Image (spheres, grey):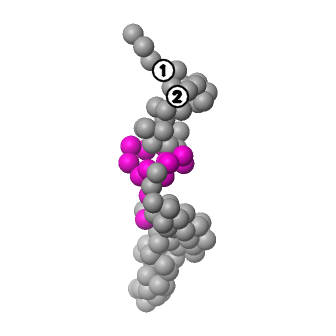
C-alpha cells in the first residue's frame, strides 16, 4: 500500500483539475489566439499563472485504485500490475483469464 498522504495529495490534485478545467482552457485559448492584441494575451497569461499549479492535468499521477501504487499502472484496468495479477488469479476480474501453455 502507498502512503495515505500520497494518495490524498493526488486526489486533491484531481479535484483541483476538475475545478479549474474550464477557466484554464478559456485562458489558454485567449493566450494562444494570435489575432488578439499582445496586451490582452499577456494579461491572460498572467491570470493563467495565478491559477494553482496543482490544477494542471499533468500534475496528476496515475495510481492503482486498489493499492495506490504509482508504478506499473494499466490505464484500461486502472490498477497496478501486481493488483491485476492477484485479482486475475482469484478470478475477480471479468474477461481476464490466467494464461497457461
Q: For the C terminus, which image quadrant? A: top left
The answer to whether 88 is drawn above or below residue 62 in the figure is above
Name the one closer to the observer, 41 or 93.
93
Q: CA distance from mark 1 to mark 2?
A: 7 Å
The spot of residue 55 in percent (x, y) is 50, 71
Find residue 21 and report its image quarter. bottom right
Residue shown at 38% from the left, 48% from the top: 71
Residue 60 magenta: yes
Q: Is residue 94 visible?
A: yes
Q: Which residue is mark 2?
A: 88
* Residue displayed at 52% across by 21% down: 97
From the viewer's side, name the closer residue of 4 and 28. Answer: 4
- Binning the other alpha carbons within 10 Å of mark 2 as few (below 14), some (14 to 19) or many (20 upward) gives some
Q: Which residue is more in the foreground, 11 or 89?
A: 89
Q: Secondary structure at mark 2?
A: helix
Circle 1 packing at 10 Å, graded few (<14), some (14-19), many (20+), is: few
Q: Secondary structure at mark 1?
A: loop
- Would you say residue 64 sits in the magenta stretch? yes
| Residue ID at (58%, 30%) | 93
Q: Which residue is mark 1?
A: 98
72 in relation to 10, above or below: above
Tell me if I can see residue 57 in this picture.
no
Give coordinates of residue 27: x percent, y percent. Answer: 51, 76
Q: Are marks 1 and 2 in contact (CB under 8 Å)?
A: yes
Residue 65 on image: x %, y %: 54, 48
Q: Position of residue 61 (x, y in %)?
A: 44, 58
Sequence order check: which comes first, mark 1 or mark 2?
2
**Magenta-drawn segment:** 59-75
**Residue reaching furthest to the top:** 101
**Residue located 48% across and 78% down the image:** 52
Amino acid at each position: 500500500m502507498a502512503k495515505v498522504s500520497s494518495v490524498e495529495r493526488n486526489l486533491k490534485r484531481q479535484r483541483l483539475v476538475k475545478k479549474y478545467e474550464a477557466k484554464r482552457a478559456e485562458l489558454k485559448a485567449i493566450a494562444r489566439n494570435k489575432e488578439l492584441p499582445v496586451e490582452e494575451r499577456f494579461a491572460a497569461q498572467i491570470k493563467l499563472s495565478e491559477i494553482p499549479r496543482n490544477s494542471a492535468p499533468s500534475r496528476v499521477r496515475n495510481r492503482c485504485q486498489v493499492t495506490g501504487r504509482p508504478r506499473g499502472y494499466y490505464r484500461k484496468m486502472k490498477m497496478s500490475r501486481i493488483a491485476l495479477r492477484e485479482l486475475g488469479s482469484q478470478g475477480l476480474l471479468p474477461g481476464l483469464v490466467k494464461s497457461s501453455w
